[in-house]
Image (spheres, grey):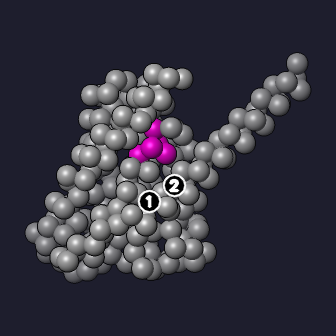
């Protein structure tokens, strides 16, 4: 009996690690789908959708772990974020606040999932969309500071252009999650 419990924990651990690696890789891959804006140093990407999916599928600690792994890979020189910088420069460049926000976003969405708050399409969509502020707020704050922008310029360059995309990506993430819940 004890060996069965140990075997189940090992399989669970391998599944958890696999999930962390998968959502780290998905977030890195999503950085390659980007649209550059002429008025902003921050491109539009699919990364926030990948981060949201990591949070809702892995839970709080798995979601944040996938983003910590992503940051560690960047620190080792891998191109995993949307900017042209690699290494620790990606954290201090104009997109650094968004990168840190990814950890918050994944953790908060995972915590909502862990507490059973993500039930039904409408509720899941609203919570995923509202939680995107955990990416946008630190992103705008860091953009303002790192690029010496005024508040109005930082909001125009780092918040407003992302709202429509966040609505769409939140809807898609909620759809995938709710569909998965219904089928499993």
Q: Position of residue 120 (x, y in %)?
A: 34, 23
**Mark pair 1, 2: CA separation:** 6 Å
SS at circle 1 = helix
* Residues rendered magenta in the picture: 52-56
**Nearest the eye: 8 or 134:** 8
- Asked if the stretch drawn in magenta spans residue 55, the answer is yes
Residue, disc 2: 26
Q: Quadrant of the C terminus?
A: top right
Compared across the picture, whether 14 is left or right of 116 comes to: right
User: Residue at coordinates 36% horizontally, 36% vertically from top-left?
Assistant: 174
Residue 145 to residue 67: above or below: below
Camera-nearest residue between 143 and 45: 45
**Magenta segment, prevailing SS (helix, strand or loop):** helix
The residue under the point 18% across, 76% down is: 39
Task: Say whether marks 1 and 2 touch (CB < 8 Å).
Answer: yes
The correct choice, above or below, for 172 with respect to 23 in the image is above
Q: Please provide percent x and percent y for residue 141.
A: 26, 66
Q: Which residue is mark 1?
A: 30
Determine the secondary structure under disc 2. helix
Residue 99 occupies quadrant: bottom left
Q: Is residue 154 magenta?
A: no
Q: Does residue 27 appear to the left or right of 7 in the view shown? A: left
């Amino acid at each position: 009996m004890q060996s069965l419990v140990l075997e189940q924990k090992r399989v669970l651990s391998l599944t958890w690690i696999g999930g962390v690696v998968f959502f780290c890789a998905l977030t890195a891959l999503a950085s390659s789908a980007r649209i550059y804006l002429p008025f902003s140093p921050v491109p539009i990407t699919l990364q926030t959708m990948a981060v949201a999916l990591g949070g809702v599928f892995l839970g709080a600690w798995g979601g944040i772990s996938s983003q910590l792994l992503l940051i560690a890979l960047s620190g080792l020189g891998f191109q995993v974020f949307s900017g042209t910088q690699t290494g620790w420069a990606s954290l201090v460049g104009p997109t650094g606040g968004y990168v840190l926000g990814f950890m918050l976003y994944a953790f908060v969405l995972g915590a909502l999932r862990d507490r059973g708050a993500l039930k039904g399409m409408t509720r899941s969509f609203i919570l995923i969309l509202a939680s995107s502020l955990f990416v946008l707020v630190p992103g705008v704050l860091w953009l303002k500071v790192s690029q010496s922008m005024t508040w109005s310029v930082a909001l125009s360059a780092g918040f407003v252009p992302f709202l429509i995309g966040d609505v769409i990506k939140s809807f898609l993430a909620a759809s995938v999650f709710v569909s998965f819940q219904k089928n499993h």
